[in-house]
Image (tube, rainbow, N blue to C red):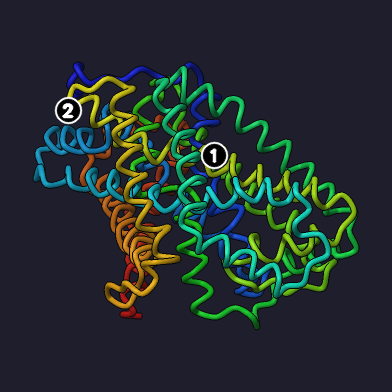
Amino acid sequence: MTDQRFVHVQWSSRLAFVLAASGSAIGLGNIWKFPYLTGEHGGGAFVLVYLLCVAAIGIPIMIAETLLGRRGRQSPINAMRSLAEAAKVNPAWQYAGWLGVISGFLILSYYSVIAGWALAYVFKMNSALFSHITPETAARYFDEFRTDPQIQVIWHTLFMVATVAIVSRGVNGGLEKGTRYLMPALAVMLVVLVLYAVGTEGLGRAVAFLFLPDFSRLSGESVLTAMGQAFFSLGLGMGSIMVYGSYLPSHVSIARSTIVVAAADTAVALFAGLAIFPIVFSNHLEPGMGPGLIFQTLPIAFGAMPGGSFFGALFFVLVFFAALTSSIAMIEPAVAWLTENRGLSREAASAWSGLACWGLGLGTLLSFSSWSDVRLFGRNLFELLDFLTADVMLPIGGFLVAVFAGWVLSRRDTEEELEMADSRAYEAWRFLVRYVAPSGMGIIFLKAMELI
């Protein structure tokens, strides 16, 4: 079925895939977005709904996306085309692959700008700039930094160069080796930060906030947000997991590996909450500060604590590493397609993809300054890209992946690829991917369109 000209190299082991896929999933969504959404939506009840959505929607789609990648053994675009041909269905299914590749590419263009902020804040925290400052001063520092396009270009460029440098070295020499070092380092830094937070007076309040559900604070909007975050946090719908699945050896269990990845991703999100909220509560700050939580609220807290400069810098190194492991996964589908279809070398494909992402990212960083008044459909460029990708393209991509794996591929093909010894586990996955996951994706899309 698979065109052997396009068979990729493979991960050296199951652990290599788990580390790489975990790196793809673990990013700004875990360490930046999950804590501030949890703060905005009341804590424990939101967390509980999020965990249920990961189990019922996120894991089934991740299994499906990995399955499609390994079955097709090509970049998402070519994989979906060859799988559609084998299933004798409309070749337009290849556009599901295109949607994923373009989504990841667009997300990386603005993701790189945000990741650049984290890298810059490593040095800002080390400079003691935030020592005993007021919330007003922290907000002013952040606004001045964010609206300076010359400074933004430097950090955005450094992040994209780091991304391209890793990806250009190939699957084993770049992606695998990079995550082999970055992921353990990320885990160690997160544990150190949690241990630091455990020693603060706000620990008890933070644990109660995160793990004791107060359903009176849970709204319909909170449930829909938790559903969207569960999907976004796992890095689904953007071709990354599919292309990583194409490198997965045939003897490795997709289901077991995927569950490990989802568990690691969820654990990092919860540990990020345990690292952040004790510090927030210890300094009598508001947990529902929104997107400014880590760039405005946390620097105030670190600046008022013993050893805060060091641990604040360590926190932003953690954010930078998490962003980097995700960025290499976002650009990989485009790089794989260019090497397959345009005959480019790995280095050239990485460089051209990175340059295009970097150029588009300039529009994002300018949207915070000189282009802030440029509006399309009521949004600046950053807001428009975020809306189109996170709220429209990714849910549609996830829906198509679930439908193709659950309804288009034959039962024999999915059973052969998954090789689940427990037939009940297979039936549970098949039910979730055919009915629950597509419904969830449809609800997220309808919410984005303000139809519900």
Residue drawn at x 83%, y 47% as measured from the top left: 195
Horizontal and vertical percent for residue 368?
Answer: 45, 65
Give me the C-alpha separation between circle 2 and circle 1.
30 Å
Residue for badge 1: 261
Q: In this view, does 70 lie to the left or right of 273?
A: left
Q: In this view, does 191 lie to the left or right of 202?
A: left
User: Mark 2: which amino acid?
Assistant: Asn
Work out whether residue 440 can be spotted. no
* SS for dot 2: helix
Residue drawn at x 16%, y 37% as measured from the top left: 81
* SS for dot 1: helix
Work out whether residue 433 can be spotted. yes
Horizontal and vertical percent for residue 248?
Answer: 40, 25
Q: In which quarter of the image is the N terminus?
A: top left
User: Mark 1: which amino acid?
Assistant: Val
Disc number lying in front (2 or 1) = 2
Q: Farthest residue toward the front? A: 150
Q: Name which of mark 2 and mark 1 comes first in the sequence.
A: 1
Horizontal and vertical percent for residue 222?
Answer: 53, 74
Residue drawn at x 60%, y 69% as measured from the top left: 46
Q: In this view, does 232 lie to the left or right of 286?
A: left
Q: Quadrant of the C terminus?
A: bottom left
User: Mark number for residue 363?
Assistant: none
Residue for badge 2: 341
| On screen, residue 349 above or below 424 | above
Residue drawn at x 27%, y 75% as measured from the top left: 377
